[in-house]
Amino acid sequence: MSLPKTLAEDVARNLVMVARLIDEDPEQAYAYSRIALRLASRVAAVREAAGFAAYATQKYSEALAEFRAAKRMTGSVELWPVMADCERGLGRPERALAMAGEPEVQKLDKAGQVEMRLVAAGARRDMGQIDAAIVTLQSSELASSAVHPWTPRLRYAYADALLAAGREDEAREWFAKALEADKDGATDASDRLAELDGVEFVDALGESDEDETVEAEADTATDGDVDDADDDGSAKA
C-alpha cells in the first residue's frame, strides 16, 4: 500500500513468482526476489521474501541480513527460528542455541516455539551432543496425541535423533508415529521405516525394460550375423 500502483503491481508479480518457484526451482525464485528487492527494498514483505529465497538457496548470510531487516521494520519475532537456523547454516550452532534462550522465543506462537525447539535440537546435533538433542525435543508437544501441522516434523526429528544415538527400537516407534501424522508426505518417514525393517524397493518396471532392451540388442546382433553369413555364402540352406 505504500507504493505507487504500477510499482506495487510489478513488485507483487515478482513476489508471486517467488512463492510459486521457491520449492521446485529455488534459484529462479531467488532471481525474482532480487528484482523485487531492487524495486522496493523498504517493504518488509519484500525483505522477508528475499530472505526465504536466499535461505532456500543456502545463502545463509544474505538470508539472515534480510530477515533482520524485516524484523526491524515490523517489530515481529515471527522470523526468529529461521534466523537461528541461518546461524546453524553459517556454522555457528552456539549462536542458534543462544537465540533459543532469548526472550523473543516466549513471544512466538506454538508453531514458532516448536520450530525453535527443532532448530535448537539441530544445533545440539551440530555440536555432537546427540543426547542433549533428544532431551531438547522431549516436550508436551511431542507427547501429545493431537496432530498439528508441525507434528510430523517434530516426531521425525525425535526419531532421527534416537537413531543417531543407537536407540533403533525407539526410533522405529517414532518414525511410525511420524508417518501416522504425516498425511501430506512432508517427511520420508515411510522410507526410513522400510530401511529399518530391511525392505529394499526394486523398480520392477525398470528392470523389465532393461531386460527387453538387452534381448532386443541380442536379437539384432544375431540377425546381423546371419545376414553377414548369407552375404559370403557360408550359411546357405
Image: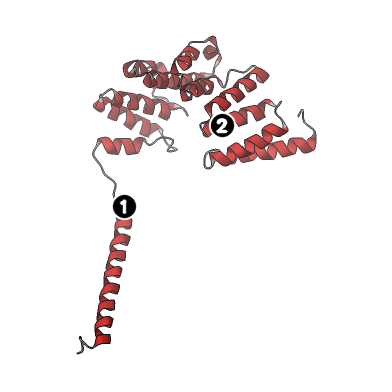
Dot 1 and dot 2 residues touching (CB under 8 Å): no
Of 28 and 135, which appears nearest the observer? 28
- Spatial CA distance of label 1 from label 2 is 36 Å
Residue at 47 percent of width and 25 percent of height? 89
Decide which of tag 1 and tag 2 comes sooner along the chain. Answer: 2
**Which residue position holds label 2?**
54
Look at the image and tell me in which quarter the N terminus lies: top right
Whole-percent x, y for residue 134 in the image: 34, 19
Measured along the vertical axis of the image, is residue 102 above or below residue 237?
above
Query: In terms of secondary structure, where does tag 1 sit?
Result: loop
Residue 126 visible? The answer is: yes
Report the amino acid beneath label 1: Asp
Determine whether 129 is above or below 13 in the image: above
Q: Which mark is residue 203?
A: 1
Residue sitting nearer the eye, 157 or 34? 34
Crowdedness of circle 2 by 10 Å Cα count: few (<14), some, many (20+)?
Answer: many
Instruction: Indicate the position of residue 234 as horizontal and vertical percent values.
Output: 20, 86
Q: Position of residue 58 (x, y in %)?
A: 51, 31
Tell me which amino acid carries mark 2.
Ala
